[in-house]
Image (spheres, rainbow, N blue to C red):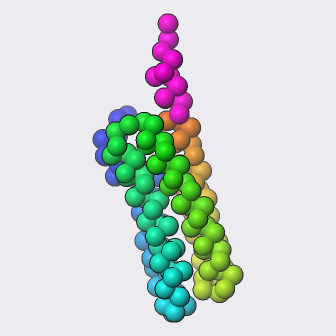
């Protein structure tokens, strides 16, 4: 199946859904007094879907792989920031665990997609004789 638009990618859809949840979660009264952390968390969340989209639009497998790695890195950054938010009691434990679990799953999905693209690239580089 050929994907013609980044909006068809399940990893992009999941990243956007998570970003919406992050925005809602960081709208609480606790985050209102800490604009810096709220802004950093939101930027990291937006970075995930943005890098998936930008990499796809480059129409180059090598660049797409690089942008997916950046998106995966943003997930790590976001998971760390959410942990801090939980530790300073800006984020309830249950919400933290839910978001962290979703981010972990998305990271695994991006990792699997990266493996698929790398394998596809190897096949293109070494055609059957």
Drawn side of residue 121 relative to residue 90, left or right = left
77 up-or-down from 106: above or below: below
Q: Residue at x 53, y 33 (%)?
A: 118
Q: Residue at x 48, y 15 (%)?
A: 127
109 up-or-down from 44: above or below: above
On whether residue 23 falls in the magenta region, the answer is no
Q: Residue furthest top?
A: 129
**Quadrant assignment, res 85:** bottom right
Numbered disc total: 0
Locate the N terminus by quadrant.
Answer: top left
Q: Residue furthest right?
A: 87
Residue 98 seen anywhere in this rendered image of the structure: no
On whether residue 128 falls in the magenta region, the answer is yes
User: Residue 61 at what x, y percent from top left?
Assistant: 42, 36
Q: Residue at x 65, y 77 (%)?
A: 84
User: Residue 49 at what x, y percent from top left?
Assistant: 42, 58
Q: Which residues are magenta?
A: 118-129
């Amino acid at each position: 199946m050929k994907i013609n638009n980044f909006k068809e990618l399940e990893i992009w859809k999941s990243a956007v859904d998570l970003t919406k949840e992050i925005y809602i979660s960081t709208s609480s009264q606790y985050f209102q007094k800490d604009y810096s952390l709220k802004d950093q968390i939101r930027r990291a969340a937006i970075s995930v879907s943005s890098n998936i989209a930008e990499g796809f639009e480059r129409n180059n497998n090598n660049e797409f792989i690089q942008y997916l790695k950046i998106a995966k890195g943003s997930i790590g950054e976001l998971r760390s920031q959410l942990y801090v938010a939980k530790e300073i009691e800006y984020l309830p434990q249950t919400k933290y665990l839910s978001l962290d679990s979703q981010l972990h799953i998305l990271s695994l999905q991006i990792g699997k997609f990266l493996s698929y693209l790398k394998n596809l690239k190897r096949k293109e580089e070494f055609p059957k004789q």
